[in-house]
Image: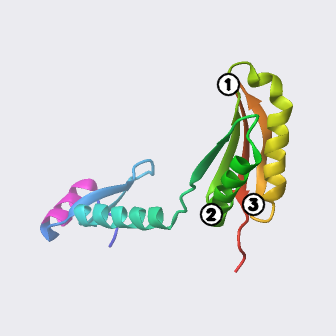
Amino acid sequence: MGVYSIREALEKAEEIGLDLVEISPSADPPVCKIMDYKKFLYEQKKRDKALKAKASKVVIKEIRFGPNTDDHDYDFKKKHAEKFLKEGAKLKAYVFFKGRSIVYKDKGEILLLRLAQELEDYGKVEQMPKLEGKRMTMFIAPKTVKK
């Protein structure tokens, strides 16, 4: 292959039965390549699909508590949280304050910190409890297993 004028390149591509594709339009002179454009698009789509399949998808599971959640409910939800973290999903634990229960902010924070402490074998706290409106939210990421 050599350097051709656009007319010569178009004629060559037509002669072979392929397409003239502009690779780098900003270059001086512009860089073009003779190729089957449909095949090029197909290959590119295939490459993108393979990369997308390799990318890990982050799953976030939520667990909701009330400020006065009793021990049995707490233990039940904690078991679910353990299962989620073992499966590799991130955990969003939050305390929802209804009506005037917002006066128990400290109870909600204690509950979330207790959960974080009891789940430290399975996950690591990504964001400490933070009050946003009527919700106090905390994120826990699963511990990665080193191979």
Q: Is residue 8 magenta?
A: yes
Residue 80 placement, left or right of 118: left
Gap between marks 2 and 3, in whole Å?
9 Å
Q: Amino acid at mark 2?
A: Gly
Task: Please tell me which residue is depicted at 56% across the width and 54% down the height of the picture.
Answer: 59
For label 1, the residue is 98
Q: Nearer the viewer, residue 71 or 60?
A: 71
Query: Magenta residues?
Result: 5-14
Q: Is residue 133 above or below residue 112?
A: above
Q: Secondary structure under badge 1?
A: loop
Q: Where, by quadrant of the figure, is residue 6 drawn?
A: bottom left
For label 2, the residue is 88
For label 3, the residue is 123
Colour mapping used in the image: rainbow
Q: Nearer the viewer, residue 48 or 82?
A: 82
Of the residues under marks 1 and 3, which one precedes in the sequence? 1
Q: Nearer the viewer, residue 11 or 133?
A: 133
Residue 15 point in image, percent of width and height: 13, 67
Q: Amino acid at mark 3?
A: Gly
Classify 10 Å Cα crowding around label 2: few (below 14), some (14-19), many (20 and above): some
Q: Is residue 95 above or below residue 10?
A: above
Q: Amino acid at mark 1?
A: Lys
Query: Which residue is most to the bottom?
Result: 147
Residue 89 placement, left or right of 100: left
Task: Please tell me which residue is depicted at 62% across the width and 63% down the height of the picture.
Answer: 88
Residue 67 point in image, percent of width and height: 76, 34
Task: Please tell me which residue is depicted at 25% across the width and 59% down the height of the picture.
Answer: 20
Residue 96 point in image, percent of width and height: 68, 32
Q: Secondary structure under badge 2?
A: loop
Residue 127 point in image, percent of width and height: 77, 45
Task: Please tell me which residue is depicted at 68% across the width and 61% down the height of the picture.
Answer: 82
Of the residues under marks 1 and 2, which one precedes in the sequence? 2
